Image (spheres, helix red, strand yellow):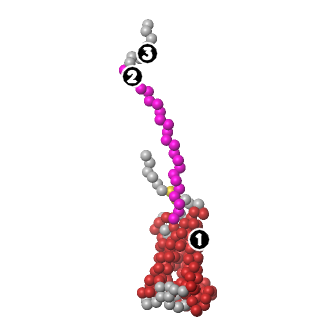
Amino acid sequence: MGVAWERRANDANSVFLAGLQAGMAAVLWMLAWLGVSSAWQQGSFWAAENLWASAFHGAAAIHRGFSTRTLSGLALYLLVYTTLGGIFAATVRTRFPRFRLLLIAVFAAVCWYYLSFHGIWRTVSPLVALLHPEQPTLLGHVIYGAALAQFPRYLPTVPPPHQEEPAPVPVAVESDAAPDVPET
Protein backbone atom coordinates (compact mmCIF):
# COMPACT_ATOMS: atom_id res chain seq x y z
CA MET A 1 0.00 0.00 0.00
CA GLY A 2 1.53 3.32 -1.05
CA VAL A 3 1.34 6.80 0.42
CA ALA A 4 -1.51 8.89 -0.96
CA TRP A 5 -0.37 12.17 -2.50
CA GLU A 6 -2.84 14.76 -3.70
CA ARG A 7 -1.91 15.96 -7.17
CA ARG A 8 -3.23 19.18 -8.63
CA ALA A 9 -3.79 20.03 -12.28
CA ASN A 10 -1.09 22.25 -13.76
CA ASP A 11 -2.38 23.03 -17.23
CA ALA A 12 -2.69 26.67 -18.32
CA ASN A 13 -6.50 26.85 -18.18
CA SER A 14 -6.74 25.32 -14.72
CA VAL A 15 -4.06 27.63 -13.35
CA PHE A 16 -5.69 30.73 -14.88
CA LEU A 17 -9.11 29.77 -13.50
CA ALA A 18 -7.61 29.10 -10.07
CA GLY A 19 -6.01 32.53 -10.24
CA LEU A 20 -9.39 34.08 -11.05
CA GLN A 21 -10.93 32.37 -8.04
CA ALA A 22 -8.10 33.39 -5.74
CA GLY A 23 -8.17 36.92 -7.15
CA MET A 24 -11.89 37.21 -6.39
CA ALA A 25 -11.45 35.97 -2.82
CA ALA A 26 -8.40 38.19 -2.34
CA VAL A 27 -10.10 41.37 -3.56
CA LEU A 28 -13.04 40.67 -1.24
CA TRP A 29 -10.61 40.43 1.69
CA MET A 30 -8.93 43.64 0.56
CA LEU A 31 -12.24 45.48 0.23
CA ALA A 32 -13.32 44.23 3.65
CA TRP A 33 -10.10 45.67 5.10
CA LEU A 34 -10.56 48.97 3.27
CA GLY A 35 -14.15 49.21 4.50
CA VAL A 36 -13.27 48.43 8.11
CA SER A 37 -10.32 50.83 8.11
CA SER A 38 -12.47 53.59 6.63
CA ALA A 39 -15.24 53.02 9.16
CA TRP A 40 -12.61 52.97 11.91
CA GLN A 41 -11.53 56.45 10.80
CA GLN A 42 -15.14 57.68 10.96
CA GLY A 43 -15.65 57.36 7.21
CA SER A 44 -18.00 55.29 5.10
CA PHE A 45 -17.50 51.55 4.76
CA TRP A 46 -18.02 52.03 1.01
CA ALA A 47 -15.48 54.84 0.58
CA ALA A 48 -13.06 52.84 -1.60
CA GLU A 49 -15.81 51.63 -3.94
CA ASN A 50 -17.32 55.13 -4.15
CA LEU A 51 -13.90 56.50 -4.99
CA TRP A 52 -13.46 54.07 -7.88
CA ALA A 53 -17.03 54.82 -9.01
CA SER A 54 -15.86 58.38 -9.60
CA ALA A 55 -14.12 57.05 -12.72
CA PHE A 56 -17.61 56.65 -14.22
CA HIS A 57 -19.72 59.22 -12.39
CA GLY A 58 -17.21 61.95 -11.49
CA ALA A 59 -17.28 63.74 -8.15
CA ALA A 60 -20.99 62.90 -7.69
CA ALA A 61 -20.00 59.32 -6.78
CA ILE A 62 -18.00 60.41 -3.75
CA HIS A 63 -20.40 60.47 -0.80
CA ARG A 64 -21.07 58.64 2.45
CA GLY A 65 -22.91 55.37 2.24
CA PHE A 66 -23.99 52.89 -0.38
CA SER A 67 -25.82 53.85 -3.56
CA THR A 68 -26.32 52.51 -7.05
CA ARG A 69 -23.17 54.37 -8.10
CA THR A 70 -21.23 52.34 -5.54
CA LEU A 71 -22.01 49.22 -7.56
CA SER A 72 -19.97 50.45 -10.52
CA GLY A 73 -16.95 51.05 -8.28
CA LEU A 74 -17.39 47.63 -6.69
CA ALA A 75 -17.69 45.99 -10.10
CA LEU A 76 -14.56 47.76 -11.30
CA TYR A 77 -12.60 46.56 -8.25
CA LEU A 78 -13.81 42.98 -8.77
CA LEU A 79 -13.07 43.04 -12.50
CA VAL A 80 -9.58 44.53 -12.24
CA TYR A 81 -8.34 42.50 -9.28
CA THR A 82 -9.90 39.20 -10.35
CA THR A 83 -8.29 39.56 -13.77
CA LEU A 84 -5.02 40.50 -12.12
CA GLY A 85 -5.25 37.28 -10.07
CA GLY A 86 -5.69 35.18 -13.20
CA ILE A 87 -2.76 36.87 -14.93
CA PHE A 88 -0.57 36.44 -11.85
CA ALA A 89 -1.38 32.73 -11.54
CA ALA A 90 -0.84 32.11 -15.25
CA THR A 91 2.52 33.88 -15.07
CA VAL A 92 3.85 32.30 -11.88
CA ARG A 93 2.09 28.91 -12.12
CA THR A 94 3.16 26.44 -9.44
CA ARG A 95 6.91 26.75 -9.86
CA PHE A 96 7.71 28.04 -6.38
CA PRO A 97 7.38 26.72 -2.84
CA ARG A 98 4.57 28.22 -0.75
CA PHE A 99 6.58 30.78 1.20
CA ARG A 100 8.36 32.07 -1.88
CA LEU A 101 5.03 32.23 -3.72
CA LEU A 102 3.65 34.30 -0.83
CA LEU A 103 6.55 36.75 -1.04
CA ILE A 104 6.24 37.03 -4.82
CA ALA A 105 2.47 37.61 -4.62
CA VAL A 106 2.79 40.30 -1.95
CA PHE A 107 5.58 41.97 -3.92
CA ALA A 108 3.48 41.88 -7.11
CA ALA A 109 0.46 43.32 -5.28
CA VAL A 110 2.51 46.19 -3.82
CA CYS A 111 4.03 46.88 -7.25
CA TRP A 112 0.53 46.92 -8.70
CA TYR A 113 -0.54 49.40 -6.01
CA TYR A 114 2.26 51.82 -6.92
CA LEU A 115 1.75 51.34 -10.65
CA SER A 116 -2.02 51.80 -10.54
CA PHE A 117 -2.53 54.45 -7.85
CA HIS A 118 0.57 56.50 -8.60
CA GLY A 119 0.55 56.03 -12.36
CA ILE A 120 -2.60 54.80 -14.08
CA TRP A 121 -5.18 56.49 -11.84
CA ARG A 122 -3.44 59.86 -12.09
CA THR A 123 -4.26 59.80 -15.79
CA VAL A 124 -7.61 57.98 -15.82
CA SER A 125 -9.27 59.51 -12.76
CA PRO A 126 -7.15 61.98 -10.77
CA LEU A 127 -9.67 61.97 -7.90
CA VAL A 128 -8.81 58.35 -7.12
CA ALA A 129 -5.07 59.06 -6.99
CA LEU A 130 -5.64 62.19 -4.93
CA LEU A 131 -8.22 60.98 -2.39
CA HIS A 132 -7.31 57.37 -1.65
CA PRO A 133 -5.94 56.73 1.86
CA GLU A 134 -2.39 55.57 1.16
CA GLN A 135 -1.50 53.48 4.21
CA PRO A 136 -4.74 51.45 4.45
CA THR A 137 -4.72 50.94 0.68
CA LEU A 138 -1.11 49.75 0.73
CA LEU A 139 -1.88 47.35 3.58
CA GLY A 140 -4.97 46.23 1.65
CA HIS A 141 -2.71 45.30 -1.25
CA VAL A 142 -0.48 43.29 1.09
CA ILE A 143 -3.61 41.42 2.23
CA TYR A 144 -4.59 40.96 -1.41
CA GLY A 145 -1.17 39.51 -2.26
CA ALA A 146 -1.23 37.15 0.72
CA ALA A 147 -4.67 35.85 -0.25
CA LEU A 148 -3.72 35.63 -3.93
CA ALA A 149 -0.77 33.39 -3.08
CA GLN A 150 -3.30 30.73 -2.10
CA PHE A 151 -4.31 30.13 -5.73
CA PRO A 152 -2.83 26.57 -5.83
CA ARG A 153 -5.59 25.55 -3.39
CA TYR A 154 -8.15 26.31 -6.09
CA LEU A 155 -6.54 23.98 -8.62
CA PRO A 156 -8.61 20.86 -9.29
CA THR A 157 -7.26 17.59 -7.98
CA VAL A 158 -6.15 15.02 -10.49
CA PRO A 159 -7.10 11.44 -9.72
CA PRO A 160 -4.10 9.15 -9.40
CA PRO A 161 -3.44 6.95 -12.39
CA HIS A 162 -5.41 3.72 -12.13
CA GLN A 163 -3.13 0.89 -11.17
CA GLU A 164 -4.50 -2.55 -11.71
CA GLU A 165 -4.04 -5.09 -8.96
CA PRO A 166 -1.75 -7.90 -10.07
CA ALA A 167 -3.61 -11.10 -10.81
CA PRO A 168 -3.34 -13.59 -7.99
CA VAL A 169 -0.86 -16.36 -8.66
CA PRO A 170 -2.31 -19.82 -8.11
CA VAL A 171 -0.67 -21.56 -5.22
CA ALA A 172 0.04 -25.26 -5.39
CA VAL A 173 -1.73 -27.12 -2.64
CA GLU A 174 0.08 -30.02 -1.05
CA SER A 175 -1.95 -32.96 0.07
CA ASP A 176 -1.27 -35.72 2.52
CA ALA A 177 -1.97 -38.33 -0.08
CA ALA A 178 0.94 -40.22 -1.50
CA PRO A 179 2.25 -38.86 -4.70
CA ASP A 180 1.45 -40.70 -7.85
CA VAL A 181 4.59 -42.75 -8.24
CA PRO A 182 4.55 -45.56 -10.72
CA GLU A 183 5.13 -48.95 -9.19
CA THR A 184 7.94 -51.00 -10.50
Camera-side residue: 105 or 100?
Answer: 105
Q: Residue at x 57, y 86 (%)?
A: 69
Image: 163 above or below 144? above
Q: Amino acid at mark 1?
A: Ile
The Cα–Cα distance between marks 2 and 1, rounded to whole angstroms, is: 71 Å
Element assignment for label 1 = helix
For residue 12, which quarter of the picture?
Answer: bottom right
Q: Residue at x 57, y 66 (%)?
A: 17
Q: Residue at x 47, y 66 (%)?
A: 98
Q: Amino acid at mark 2?
A: Ser
* Residue tagged 3: 180
Mark positioned earlier in the residue sequence (2 or 1): 1
Element assignment for label 2 = loop
Circle number at residue 87: 1
Q: Amino acid at mark 3?
A: Asp
Q: Nearer the viewer, mark 1 or mark 3?
A: 3
Question: Residue reaching furthest top?
Answer: 184
The Cα–Cα distance between marks 1 and 3, rounded to whole angstroms, is: 78 Å
Examine the residues drawn in magenta and state their main secondary structure.
Answer: loop
Question: Residue reaching furthest left?
Answer: 176
Element assignment for label 3 = loop
